[in-house]
Image (cartoon, helix red, strand yellow):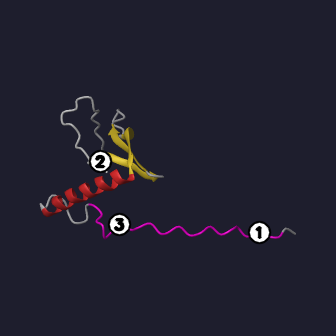
Amino acid sequence: MAKATKPRPGTLDAPEIFADDASSVAIRKNVARFTFTSDRPLGDGAEAESVVVGHVAMSVSGFLSLYGRMDSIVNQLREAGRIGSTSAPTKSTVKKPAAKAAKKPAKKTARK
């Protein structure tokens, strides 16, 4: 297996996106897909609206690697007192999805 290499620092052509939220995270097949949004003012004193500012798609293994690093950072923030213990879900509070039940054929009703 090839050894993973780190990205080259200082790559200037990579876009930088600011987002207020990840409005959607979904896994389809073997791809994790993120949709990022940012709040934009509507003007005339109206409330801001959320608009999509970018998308990221990555392999599930990359997603799990990212999750591990983010979980480590959340734990460091907790230990430093920068966030409370309920600011983000922990491994013990994240529910695992239930196993899919086998589909049963629909019951046919007799017509009269």
Where residue 73 appears, as percent x and y from the top left, is 20, 56
Tell me where the magenta segment starts and ends, as one range. 88-110
User: Secondary structure under badge 1?
Assistant: loop
- Going by the numbered disc 3, the residue's amino acid type is Val
- C-alpha separation, residue under disc 2 versus residue under disc 1: 55 Å
How many marks are shown on the rendered structure?
Answer: 3
The C terminus lies in which quarter of the figure? Answer: bottom right
> Which of pointers 3 and 1 lies earlier in the amino acid sequence?
3
- Going by the numbered disc 2, the residue's amino acid type is Ala
Q: Is residue 83 above or below residue 51?
A: below
* Proximity of marks 3 and 1: CB atoms separated by less than 8 Å: no
User: Secondary structure under badge 2?
Assistant: loop
Residue 105 forms part of the magenta stretch: yes
* Quarter where residue 13 is shown: top left
Where residue 89 appears, as percent x and y from the top left, is 30, 63
- C-alpha separation, residue under disc 2 versus residue under disc 3: 33 Å
Along the line of sight, which residue is nearer the eye, 28 or 37? Answer: 28
Residue 94's tag is 3
Residue tagged 1: 108
Residue tagged 2: 2
> Which of pointers 2 and 3 lies earlier in the amino acid sequence?
2
- Going by the numbered disc 1, the residue's amino acid type is Lys
Residue that extends furthest to the left in the rendered view of this protein: 80
Q: Is residue 19 above or below residue 63?
A: above
* Proximity of marks 2 and 3: CB atoms separated by less than 8 Å: no
Q: Is residue 16 above or below residue 26?
A: above
At x 32%, y 69%, the residue is: 93
